Structures are given as structure tokens and as C-alpha cells.
Amino acid sequence: MSVITFVCAGQMNSAITFPAFENGHEVRLVGSPLDRDIIDGLKKDNFHITLKRTLHDGIKYYQIEELEEALKGADLVLGGVSSFGLDWFCDEILPVLPEDVPVLTVTKGMVDLEDGTLVPYPHIFAQRQPEGKHLNLNAIGGPCTSYELADHDDSHVAFCGKDIETLKYIKSLLETDYYHISLSTDVVGVECAVAMKNAYALGVSLAVGLAEKRDGKIGSQHYNSQAALFGQSVKEMTKLLELIGGKPENIIHGAGDLYVTIFGGRTRKIGTLLGRGLSFEEAMAELQGVTLESIVISTRTARAVRKLAERGIVSLEDFPLLMHVDAIINQGAEVNIPWKDFTWNDFSLAE
Ligand SMILES: NC(=O)C1=CN([C@@H]2O[C@H](COP(=O)(O)OP(=O)(O)OC[C@H]3O[C@@H](n4cnc5c(N)ncnc54)[C@H](OP(=O)(O)O)[C@@H]3O)[C@@H](O)[C@H]2O)C=CC1
Ligand SMILES: O=C(CO)COP(=O)(O)O
């Protein structure tokens, strides 16, 4: 039996307590300063108020002030912060994590630099750890919604990090007959692929709302338009992946993650509302309190691509969907899918 300490009691970290606990480990779940109600509720009856699932009886719960105690003797630390708490995690948590214990983070995203470079979160964590500290940082990517993992639906994710032995060790702690884990040392590839899908999931789900608006019926679906946007998303994501320097094979994690997010993610909600005709502000107001990382990553990726276009490294014409999503979010544009910009010809084999 090992000791696994989860820092942040958000939906995803809490869902991973299922495979961890079922593998016989001691599971300690520590709330962020914003998770007080979640931890109070769990202490009462194991019911998680945002995941809306009952966690295993026997998990130990801690408020943030008890972090030091929760870290004592830990063999693995899971980091479950979202993009919105990234600074808090870097400033308050990284400094107190023991150097000899591997860390596995669930946070999906990238930061864009002035020159248009996109940096995945695991690299940001590495850069922002205290000087001279060398945490063993690893991350999870791939399609896996929290509540379906909690329900034991078969899920296939990728753990990525620099050290193969560490990755194998973490996998041995968390793999179950329903939680399937691939390993990769291509951190940039895995993390960029799954971060980008959040921007594109918003783009595809615009079609969900557009269909409802056209038919005047909530729940009405048109798969041609969704599929066309899905294909365009994969095309743009593949280009971005290449640009960022990730191995092309990682598109499997990004495309799978795109699929699950369109059908079961929170991002679907914002795309659908925008497709129905709500303004960005109206849609955000309706979804107040919902974790929407798609907004952050769409804005950052579009900003990076524009910067790279200015530098002559990419052409904006290769990213019509990303540019449209960004225009809706940041420039008040109305939804008007640029269908004609998606068409392309391949005459390379012409006689
Ligand atoms: N949910 C899912 O299905 C999946 C999520 N992920 C990724 O996992 C990460 C976490 O997502 P998820 O667990 O769903 O999100 P949640 O919003 O449920 O949890 C996020 C965690 O970060 C904390 N947090 C947010 N803002 C701050 C802040 N300003 N300061 C301190 N802590 C903060 C939250 O506290 P509080 O809850 O109080 O806001 C919570 O502990 C994301 O990057 C997401 O993309 C990956 C795969 C699937
Ligand atoms: O990343 C996810 C599934 O892999 C969930 O995405 P959302 O943040 O849109 O819910």
C-alpha cells in the first residue's frame, strides 16, 4: 500500500481517488482554499458536491491548513488545480512539495509568451518551482471526464513526464481494469494536444447550438455540421502540434479528448449557448461558477498564432476556426462559421 496525497479537491482530482483507493492505497484529499465546502461535505458523508458522486468511505479529508500533515509519508502527489488557480499552485504549493516524491498534475493548458511560443503547464510548473528545487513533475492528458471515471467507465489516458521509471511507477499505483494508462516522454506533445482540444471543443459545439436555433428545438442535433467542425479542428490541431514540436502521434490524445469534451465536457455548454445566439457575456453569465478552461486556452492559442503570423512563421488562413472562436470570445463577433475557409484541394497526385 502506498500513500497518495491529492492537492485540490476539484472534480478531476477527486475522480482519480476512485482508482487510487480501489488499488488499496491510503488516499488523502486536500482542498484548495476555495474547496472548503467540498471538504466539509466530504467529511460529513463522503458526498462530493461538485462531482456529484459519493467517494469511497475511508478516504482522509484535509483543509488546506492541514497540507503539511497530509504530505507526510506521501509516495505520490496529485495536483488538481485548474488554470484559474495556476499562480496559487505555483506560489503556495510547489514550494512545500517534497523533492523526492513524484508529482502528477491533471491541469490542462498552455501559457503563451510574448514571441508566440506556447508553453505547456508542466514546463511552467518546472520553471516556477523555487530556485534550486527539482521536483519530479509528470502530467495526465487524454479523454477522461471526471464523473465518468468516477462511474468506472473504461477510460484511456496518457501519463507523461521525463523519467520512464517514474512513469511506470505512477502507472503501477493507479492503473485498474477500467483506468487504462499509456506512457509518454513527449510532454510537449501530449500536453499541447489535450490543451488545444478545449479551444476546438468550443468551436465544434457551436454547431450544437446552431442546430437547435435553426430547428427551434433544444436537443435537436445535426451531425454533418458537427463532423465538419470536428475534422477542421483535428486539421488545425495537427498543424499546431507540429508547430509546437510535439510528435504527430499525440493527435490521438487530442482528438479523443476533443470527442469526449464535445459530448460530455463543460466546454460544450458554452459553445452550445453561443451557437444558440447568446452573446459571449450572456453565455458566461448563464454558466457562472462552471470551470471553463476553453476560454483561457482559445485566447492564448489565438494570441500566439497571431504573433507567429506577424513573424511570418504561420499563416492565419490555416486556422480559420480558431480565429473565429477567438473573435467570438474577445472581439464580440457573432457566430458565423467560416465554412468556405475550410475547403481545400489536394492536386498533388495530378498527372
Ligand atoms: N473535469 C474533468 O472532466 C477533467 C478535468 N481536467 C483538467 O483538470 C483540471 C481541473 O479540472 P476540474 O477538477 O474539473 O476543475 P474544478 O474546478 O472542479 O477544480 C479545480 C481546482 O482548482 C481550484 N482553484 C480554482 N481556482 C483557484 C484559485 N484561484 N486559487 C486556488 N485554487 C483554485 C479549485 O477550487 P474550487 O473548486 O473551489 O474552485 C479546485 O480545487 C483542469 O485543468 C481540467 O482541464 C482534465 C480531465 C478531465
Ligand atoms: O478535459 C475534459 C475531458 O477529458 C473535460 O473538459 P471540460 O473542462 O470541458 O469539462
Image (cartoon, rainbow, N blue to C red):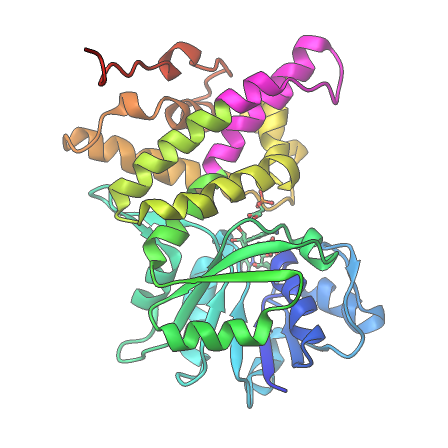
Q: Which residues are magenta?
A: 199-228
Residue at 48%, 78% (x, y): give it.
169
In the image, farthest residue toward the bottom:
73
Residue 223 image position (x, y, % from top left): 61, 20
Residue at 39%, 57% (x, y): give it.
121
Residue at 77%, 67% (x, y): give it.
55
In the image, farthest residue toward the front:
351
Q: Is residue 339 above or below residue 190?
A: above
Horizontally, residue 294 falls left or right of residue 120, namely: right
Q: Main secondary structure of the magenta part?
A: helix
Mark yes or no: residue 158 visible: yes
Horizontally, residue 280 falls left or right of residue 313, namely: right
Residue 138 image position (x, y, % from top left): 42, 67
Instruction: Tell me, yes or no, whether the highlighted magenta stretch contains residue 127.
Output: no
Residue at 71%, 74% (x, y): give it.
22
In the image, farthest residue toward the right:
45
Q: Is residue 51 above or below residue 14?
A: above
